[in-house]
């Protein structure tokens, strides 16, 4: 992984390229959206990239 862990960010998405041991995010920075969300269920991590297998 090229990027460093973001302290305090917990990520359960094991299929994400930036998912690290202990459910840590290694994206370096994240973007959460969309801006018109009105509740938790409407938000997403825009930084998500599928992990390559192989």
Image (tube, helix red, strand yellow):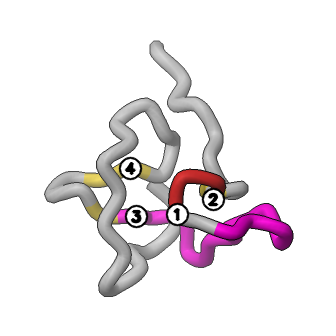
Mark 2 element type: loop
User: What is the x, y in percent for residue 4?
Assistant: 44, 75
Bin the neighbour count of mark 2 within 10 Å (Cα to Cα): few under 14, some 14-19, many 20 and up.
some
Judged left or right of residue 6, residue 37 is right
Residue tagged 4: 19
In the structure shown, which secondary structural element does the residue marked by tag 1 occupy? helix
Q: Is residue 8 left or right of residue 44?
A: left
| Looking at the image, residue 30 lies above or below residue 47 | below
Horizontal side of 14 relative to 30 (left or right) equals left
- Near mark 3 (Cα within 10 A), the count class, few <14, some 14-19 or many ≥20, is many
Percent x, y for residue 51?
Answer: 51, 30
Query: In the rendered view, would you say 15 is above or below 16?
Result: above
Q: Which residue appears at 33% of the width and 85% of the height?
A: 7
Q: Which residues are magenta?
A: 25-38
Name the one closer to the observer, 4 or 12.
12
In three-dimensional space, the C-alpha distance between marks 3 and 1, rounded to whole angstroms, equals 19 Å
The residue wearing badge 2 is 43
Q: Mark 3 or 1 closer to N-term?
A: 3
Disc with the residue nearer the chain's start (3 vs 4):
4
Q: Residue at x 31, y 84 (%)?
A: 8
Determine the residue positioned at 38% across, 49% down: 19
Q: Which of the numbered marks, if any, corresponds to residue 40?
A: 1
Q: Earlier in the sequence, mark 2 or mark 4?
A: 4
The residue that mark 3 highlights is 25
Instruction: Assign a secondary structure to mark 3.
Output: strand
Mark 4, other Cα within 10 Å: few <14 / some 14–19 / many ≥20: many
């Amino acid at each position: 992984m090229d990027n460093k862990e973001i302290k305090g960010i917990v990520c359960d998405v094991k299929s994400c390229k930036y998912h690290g041991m202990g459910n840590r995010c290694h994206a370096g920075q994240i973007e959460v959206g969309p801006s018109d969300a009105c509740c938790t269920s409407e938000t997403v991590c825009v930084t998500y990239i599928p992990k390559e297998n192989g």
